[in-house]
Image: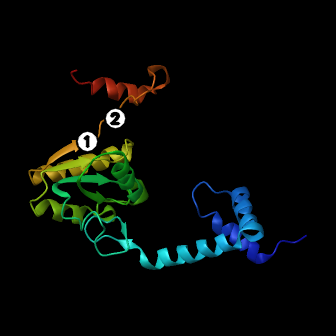
Amino acid sequence: MAQSPLIGRLIEAFQCLPGVGPKSAQRMTYYLLERNRQGANLLADTLHEAVQNIGNCQRCRTLSEHPLCPTCSNPARDASLLCVVETPSDMQLIELATGFKGRYFVLMGHLSPLDGIGPEEIGMSDLEKIFAEGQVREVILATNPTVEGEATAHYISDMAHQYAVRATRLAHGVPLGGELEFVDGGTLSHAFSSRKDL
């Protein structure tokens, strides 16, 4: 039996999601069409509304329905502390897992010259304007512990020092509850060299 062209397009559309291959996309398509058309309509309507109405915060660059996100528009947040993250999901994770009460700056990526991603593509001029305002005392660099994330952190650290802003980096090392036997050599080496007094 030949497949409907529209079903084929829907299966292909689902594959734009990370980690969704042809089989998963096919399962989602047939589930929505066979068993949950109401859910499919809700998904379609919500996705359309989100794409039309969600942009970027004018200050921190995270995803927001308004010119300023709730974090940037909250006067109770400490403007002297700025946490720099790579993605909005990293920002959300820090919000949920920590008691951080400062502000954020979302890069929407990291420096990657091989991929054509330089300082302008990740908003470094916007970040420099925030440093120039003189409110930030400390910038917490929460980029990923990858080669690109480390390079991005060093770039921001150099910029921060030009404005007398203290730059700190999230600690990396052995995970809480982890066993040394299962930690990779690079992580263990970094943790060993970054040890602290007890």
The amino acid pointed to by label 2 is His
Give the vertical position of 70 relative to 141 (above or below). Answer: below
Residue drawn at point x = 18 percent, y = 45 percent: 167
Label 2–label 1 contact, CB within 8 A = yes
Percent of width and height locating residue 8: 75, 71
Within-10-Å neighbours for mark 1: few <14, some 14–19, many 20+: some
Q: Tell me the element at label 2.
A: loop
Residue drawn at point x = 24 percent, y = 50 percent: 155
Q: Is residue 91 left or right of residue 24?
A: left
- The answer to which image quadrant residue 175 occupies is top left
- Looking at the image, what colour scheme do you see? rainbow
Which numbered tag is attached to residue 172?
A: 2
Total labels: the figure holds 2
Q: In the picture, which quadrant includes the C terminus? A: top left
Q: Tell me the element at label 1.
A: strand
- The answer to which image quadrant residue 6 occupies is bottom right
Which numbered tag is attached to residue 169?
A: 1
Residue drawn at point x = 26 percent, y = 52 percent: 83
Viewer-closest of 142 and 190: 142
Which numbered tag is attached to residue 7?
A: none
Within-10-Å neighbours for mark 2: few <14, some 14–19, many 20+: few
Percent of width and height locating residue 166: 14, 46
Give the vertical position of 15 relative to 149 (above or below). Answer: below
Percent of width and height locating residue 61: 31, 66
The amino acid pointed to by label 1 is Arg
Q: In the picture, which quadrant includes the N terminus? A: bottom right
Percent of width and height locating residue 53: 43, 78
Disc 2 to disc 1, C-alpha distance: 9 Å
Give the vertical position of 188 relative to 103 (above or below). Answer: above
Residue drawn at point x = 78 percent, y = 68 percent: 34
